[in-house]
Image (spheres, helix red, strand yellow):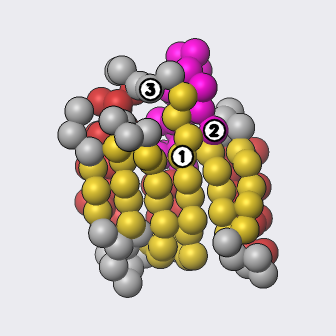
Amino acid sequence: MDKFEFAGTDDRPTVLLDKDNSKFEFSGKSLPEDVEEFYRPIINWLEDYSEDPNQKTDIVFKMDYFNTASSKMLLDVMGKFEDIKENGNDVVIHWFYMEDDEDMQEAGEGYEELVEVPFEFGTF
């Protein structure tokens, strides 16, 4: 399976989805003009990955900021990881936020309540 890699910009996050090296990372800012256009290939990749996932999937989120439209798409992304977990695989979301960024901490805690995937929190 080919890896999905997108180098972040001022308004789009860095995304790395690499099954072979067990690296699944989202970082930076997410406020693209067309969130559907940006996130659709990511969700498609995750749908393909869910058909033959790694036994353990650790996902790292290090988001600085995301807008409301992106928050919905991030929830959709996490829903794909929830599907993988529900099929008997080990999945953990590692949610990192800047030490003094209560908004990002609370965003992670909100997602934790919405998806049936264990979260681990940390600061950077």
| Disc 1 packing (10 Å; few <14; some 14–19; many ≥20) | many
Q: Dot 1 corresponds to which residue?
A: 59
Q: In this view of the protein, can residue 85 be seen by the observer? A: no
Provide the secondary structure element on which disc 3 rests.
loop
Q: Residue at x 49, y 66 (%)?
A: 27
Q: In the current view of this chain or complex, which residue is farthest to the top?
A: 88
Looking at the rendering, the stretch of residues picked out in magenta corresponds to: 75-92
Q: Position of residue 26 (x, y in %)?
A: 47, 59
Q: Amino acid at mark 1?
A: Ile
Residue at (26, 45) in percent of width and height:
3
Going by the numbered disc 3, the residue's amino acid type is: Asn
Q: Dot 2 corresponds to which residue?
A: 92
Q: Are marks 2 and 1 in contact (CB under 8 Å)?
A: yes
- The Cα atoms of the two marked residues, 1 and 3, are separated by 12 Å
User: Between disc 2 and disc 3, whose residue precedes?
Assistant: 3
- Circle nearer the N terminus (1, 3): 3
Q: Is residue 109 left or right of residue 33?
A: right
Mark 2 and mark 1: span between their CA atoms?
6 Å
In the rendered structure, which amino acid carries the disc numbered 2? Val
- The spot of residue 85 in percent (x, y) is 58, 25
Decide if residue 2 is on the left or right side of residue 91: left
Residue situated in front as seen by the camera: 22 or 33: 22
Against 62, is 2 above or below? above
Q: Nearer the viewer, residue 106 or 61?
A: 61
In the rendered image, residue 80 lying in the magenta stretch gets the answer yes
Q: Mark 1: which secondary structure?
A: strand
The residue pinned by badge 3 equals 54
- Of the 4 image quadrants, the one containing the C terminus is bottom right
Q: Which residue is pictured at 44% across the width and 26% down the height? A: 54
* 48 lies left or right of 101: left
Question: How would you rate the neighbour count of disc 3 (Cα within 10 Å): few for under 14, some for 14-19, many for 20 or more?
Answer: some
> Which quadrant of the rendered structure holds the N terminus?
top left
